[in-house]
Amino acid sequence: MGLFSGMNISASALTAQKLRLDLISNNIANMNTTNSGRTTPGGNPIPYQREIAIFSSRPPQKDFASLFQDARTQLSSEGVQVTQVIEDESPFRLEYNPNSPEAAKVAEQGIPVGYVRYPNVNLSQEMIDMISASRSYEANVTALNASKAMASKALEIGKG
């Protein structure tokens, strides 16, 4: 483990949580978007679908020196990355409003005629996710600052 490994791990987590916060704000901004520009096979509009970030551990960075290490040495993960952004498959909220231009004109599975589908974004869930992402971000900033302080103290010891 190098001098900057802790900082790199914290930086990757900060980047991942920033993307998560961006997705949450996008979900909140589109919570009333009933037409995403896509349509069903019957021609009914498809509303915005909530987006979720999927995280995974980031594989270690292999440098030239690590190629010559003992084959029995296990490399550990070095941070987190967003593997993919998926659309939430939970059902849309239905509201009967036959006068709306977004109302279903053709009956399809899950949407009767005259109903408008609203996005599957729940403001309470988004706020919970936002608090979680914000706290994770703050924790990683604290870890980054601790890594910087340790590196600084190590350099001071070297001067001694």
Image (cartoon, helix red, strand yellow):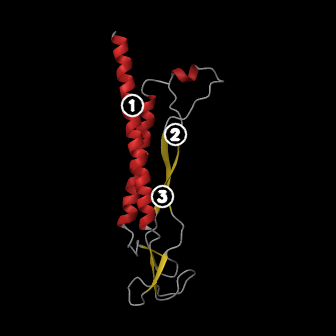
Quadrant of the rendered structure where residue 137 is? top left
Residue with the most extreme top position: 160
**89 to 1, vertically: above or below:** below
Q: CA distance from mark 1 to mark 3?
A: 30 Å
Image position, residue 109 (x, y; %): 58, 81
Q: Secondary structure at mark 2?
A: loop
Q: Which residue is mark 1?
A: 146
Q: CA distance from mark 2 to mark 1?
A: 21 Å
Closest to the observer: 89 or 157?
157
Q: Which residue is mark 2?
A: 58
Mark 1 or mark 3, which has the lower sequence index?
Answer: 3
On the rendered image, what quadrant is the C terminus found in? top left
**39 to 150, vertically: above or below:** below
Image position, residue 49 (x, y; %): 46, 67
Q: Which residue is mark 3?
A: 52
Q: Residue at x 38, y 90 (%)?
A: 99
Mark 3 or mark 2, which has the lower sequence index?
Answer: 3
Quadrant of the rendered structure where residue 102 is? bottom left
Looking at numbered disc 2 in the image, what kind of residue is underneath it?
Arg
Q: Residue at x 39, y 31 (%)?
A: 146
* Dots 1, 3 in contact, CB < 8 A: no
Q: Residue at x 52, y 82 (%)?
A: 111
Looking at numbered disc 3 in the image, what kind of residue is underneath it?
Ile
Q: CA distance from mark 3 to mark 2?
A: 18 Å
Quadrant of the rendered structure where residue 149 is? top left
